[in-house]
Amino acid sequence: MTQALALSPEGQLKLVIFDCDGVLVDSEQTCCRISAEEARAVGLNIPAENAVDEFSGMALPEIQKDIEKKTGKSLGPDWANRVQKRFVEAMKKGVEPIDGVHAMLDGVKKLGLPVRVGSNSSVEEMDAKFIATDMTHYFTNRIHSARDMGVPKPRPDVYLHAAEQEGVSPANCVVLEDSNTGARAAVDAGMMCVLLRPGSESVPDWPNLVRIRHLSEFVPLLKKALQSQG
C-alpha cells in the first residue's frame, strides 16, 4: 500500500526540505550569468538575458556537458571546480534573499517543523550565500549538497539523503522548489513538492506537485496540512 504524502489529511508532515537558489536566495541570475560568460568564452552565443532560461536548475557538470555537446570542445576536467570558485566569490560580494524568506522560515519554525536544505550548489557556496543573507542560523548542520555528493538533480539522491539524515520517510517530507529539474528530483524521491512559480509561468503536469506564487503562501499551506492531520 502506498504511503500517503505529507500534505494529505491521511499523511504525516515531519520535515521541510528547501532548495537554495530561487527559493531562499536570489543567486540564480548571478550563477546563470557566469555560466553564460563561460559559454561565450568558448564560442557559444548565449546572451546574458537568456542565461536563466538556458541554465536554470542545472548543476555545473550538466552545464559543462551541455556546452561541450553544443560546441564540440572539451572544457577540461577542472572546469566545474573553477566556475564553482567564481560562484563562491560572487556570493561573497553580495546576494539578495528571496522576498519574504525570513518571515517564511520563522513561520515554519513556529510550526515546530525541522528544516533541511538540498541543493545542486556546493556546501561552500551555500555557506557564502547564507552568511550574506543572514540565514546561517536556520540551517546549522542541515545543508546537503548534490554537487558534493556527485549526484546532481534531477537525481533524487540529495533529497533522499536529507530525509535519511532526519530519520523520516520520504513520504513525510515536503520539498520547496522553483525549477523543473529540482521538482523532478523531489517527485522521483517520493516526496510532495511545492513549486514556487509566478502565475504567468507554466507548471509541469506531474503528480504530487502544488504551485505557490509567493513565499507568503507556504506557511499557511503547511499549517493547513498539519491541522488536517490532527
Image (spheres, rainbow, N blue to C red):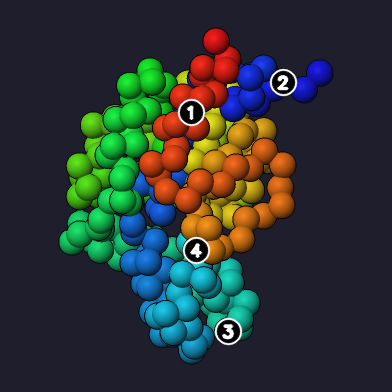
- Give the label, 1 or 3, closer to the camera: 1
Q: Which residue type carries mark 1? A: Leu
Which one is earlier in the sequence, the residue at label 1 or at label 3?
A: 3
Q: Left of 92 or right of it: where is 206?
A: right
Q: Which residue type carries mark 4? A: Ser
Q: Nearer the viewer, residue 25 or 89?
A: 25
Q: Quick check: can you spot residue 212?
A: yes
- Give the label, 3 or 4, closer to the camera: 4
SS class of the residue under badge 4? loop
Which one is earlier in the sequence, the residue at label 1 or at label 4?
A: 4
Q: Which residue type carries mark 3? A: Thr
Q: Left of 108 or right of it: where is 227?
A: right
Q: Distance between the residues labelled 1 and 3?
A: 45 Å
Identity of the residue drawn at 77% across and 22% down: 2
Q: Residue furthest top?
A: 230
Percent x, y of residue 92: 20, 57
| Residue 3: numbered disc | 2
SS class of the residue under badge 1? helix
| Residue 222: numbered disc | 1
Q: Which residue is identified by label 3?
A: 71
Q: In this view, does 116 lie above or below 230?
A: below
